[in-house]
Image: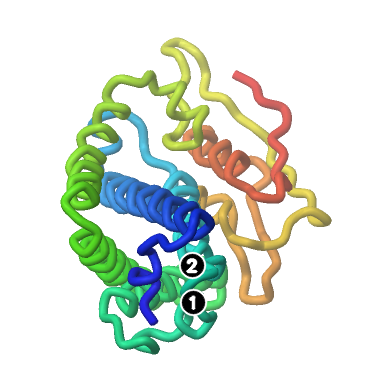
Amino acid sequence: MSPFAALIPVSPHDTGIAEAATLSGRLTYLCMCLTLCWGVLAATGWVRRFSGRDAIRAGHVVLAAFTLALGTLHGLTFLFLEDDPVGVADLLLPFYNGTPRHALGIAGLELVIAVSVTAGLRRGAREGRWLRFHQAGYLAIGLLAAHAWLGAIASGHLAVVWLAGITLITPPVLLSVLRVLPAHVLARAGLVTAPPEEPGLEPATVRVDVDSQRCHAYGVCQSEAPQVFQLGQDGQLAYEKRPEAQLVPHVQAAARACPMRAIHLLGATR
């Protein structure tokens, strides 16, 4: 059966499940719009144009992680329906129940998961090949958007208004945040690189130290500062202990983005 058909509340319990599914679905759509907008703005240089700073890839990764988590939560809520239960196969296999919009949502979410997993394993693949597969994320967003809009149309006019509002408001709000918030606030949030040094002062230098016991070789540091951090085919991390001064903002971004907090920056001087 279709989870969307199951959203018609029959009992107070299922009414609450339906409301939770609706809320998680809208939050997923919002995070998806933010992820797409941030990725496009970063890739096209609009982040730098509006904020004066380069975008940090970790911000895009965090938004994508929220999208994936909320999308998974949205699907799992249907398992808790009691009056007209949904099976695990309904949530994992596209077209298992013959509902097109259900199939679009499953295929889109599973494609997002595949892209996310390969992002963590890309050190074992060529960069060009990985980037081509990463572009499949746009197809996943298209599938999820079609799933959301078909579901909203089936749910009524109010759901369509909600979805249209999120779609139209997200880009201008994101651009307004980049324009209004100071650069140091955006840098502290891990969205852009740190502001440059004040005029008349020597550029800051740091010594990089990586705790090999904590490092799990996820490759996030290489994404932020490829001139400093490099993962070999054997999974071992090689890095410059004394990076050039102009690379310090990227090294600092890598240290902030490291999920294991394995990168330590020592001896910052001017």
- Give the numbered dot on residue 167: none
**What SS does tag 2 mark?**
helix
Separation of marks 1 and 2 at Cα, in angstroms: 6 Å
How many circles with numbers are drawn on the protein?
A: 2
Q: Nearer the viewer, residue 26 or 180?
A: 26
Residue drawn at (49%, 49%) of the image: 62
Q: Which residue is mark 1?
A: 86
Q: Quadrant of residue 176 in the image?
A: top left
**Label 2: how many residues lie within 10 Å, few (<14), some (14-19) or many (20+)?**
many
| Marks 1,2: beta carbons within 8 A | yes
Position of 216 with respect to 142 (left or right) is right
Q: Is residue 252 above or below residue 145?
A: above
The type of residue carrying mark 2 is: Phe
Q: Nearer the viewer, residue 6 or 247?
A: 6
Residue drawn at (54%, 56%) of the image: 222
The percent position of residue 48, horizontal first and vertical second, equals: 29, 35
Is residue 252 among the parts visible in the rendering?
yes
Most extreme residue toward the front is: 11
The percent position of residue 230, horizontal first and vertical second, equals: 58, 60
- Give the numbered dot on residue 78: 2
